[in-house]
Amino acid sequence: MLTVREGGKAQIAGQALQDVFERGDTAIVDRLVRPDYIQHNPLAPDGPDALKFFSSTMRQQFPAATFTPRRAISDGDLVLLHSRSVLVPGTPGMAVFDIFRFQDGKIAEHWDILQEVPATTANGNDMFATLSRPRTEASGQRWFTAYHKKLVTAFLDELLVRKDLAAIDTYVGAEYHEHSPTIPDGVAGLKAGLGAYFEQFPQLSVVPKRVIAEGDLVAVHSHYIDTPGERGRAALDLFRVRDGKIVEHWDASQGMPESAANDNTMF
């Protein structure tokens, strides 16, 4: 039986994704995934057998697909992976966030968000690079994890829930790098981009569902509803915090479909 040490879950989750979706090795599913596996991807049913079938179908349709994890967070029984998936070589691919819940050493539950990478962005940055210093994709300052989680939670509550742009002056550092493709770079770009967003959707509702943090990286999985009555979007915002200020942000969002292959929501 495969056992998972604390701190090793992220590496195992990343390896599992590459083995299943890039190499087509579905045998690993029996070793890593619980028989009562819960799936929140709207295209896939529950259970490990469904995961194997989904993987096989993807491999048949996209035999040259690649899946490259860029950064990972491990927080208790939750692991978040930020990855680039390219189904067809030569295309921009997709920004992908996967969240796994481990139980008794195996993957018990999975959420994900996929967004196509556009040809151009409003900030000139790609959706994956690390630009803030030090330019490492690994999480750092782990002794500040709890503080960073509290800081980002407060920031999103003031900025997105209460729609107070003044939160940007309080929480965002002068060296701020934006990777969301529709928001300009820098502090001024963030203010302008979100200000326009709030004006366009004055009844915007953002409901955070879970916060996952390790060191200077904090991820928030939320339900965005631009206009009341809409199904909305599942979104993942990933922040980097250095010296008590938010210095970098990546994200992805995916519209919630009318129906799904499982009885679970995307949250």
Image (cartoon, grey):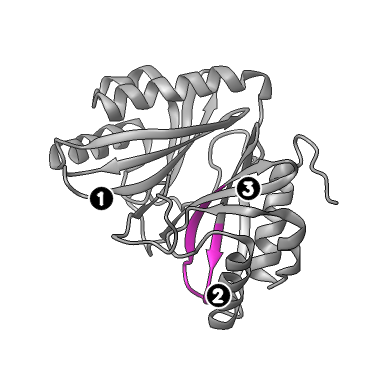
Tell me where residue 94 appears, x and y as whole percent.
47, 62
Q: Write down the quadrant of residue 47 in the picture.
A: bottom right
Give the residue type at disc 1: Arg
Q: Is residue 123 magenta?
A: no
Query: Disc 1 or 2, which lies upstream in sequence?
Result: 2
Q: Is residue 95 magenta?
A: yes
Q: Determine the residue positioned at 24% across, 35% down.
A: 205
Picture layout, residue 158 above or below residue 204: above
Q: Which mark is residue 58?
A: 2
Q: Which mark is residue 5?
A: none
Q: Write down the quadrant of residue 222 in the picture.
A: top left
Q: How many marks?
A: 3
Using residue 208 as the reference point, say whether residue 57 is left or right of it.
right
Query: Disc 1 or 3, which lies upstream in sequence?
Result: 3
Q: Nearer the viewer, residue 245 or 24?
A: 24
Tell me where residue 255 appears, x and y as whole percent.
32, 55
Q: Which mark is residue 231?
A: 1
**Around disc 2, counting alpha carbons within 10 Å, would you say few (fewer than 14), some (14 to 19), or many (20 or more)?**
some
Give the residue type at disc 2: Met
Give the residue type at disc 3: Ala
Q: Which image quarter is the C terminus in?
A: top left
Label 2 element class: helix
Using residue 164 as the reference point, say whether residue 249 is left or right of it.
right
Q: Which mark is residue 108?
A: 3
Quick check: marks 1 and 2 in contact, CB under 8 Å? no
Q: Nearer the viewer, residue 189 or 167?
A: 167
Quick check: marks 1 and 3 in contact, CB under 8 Å? no
Picture layout, residue 61 above or below residue 71: below
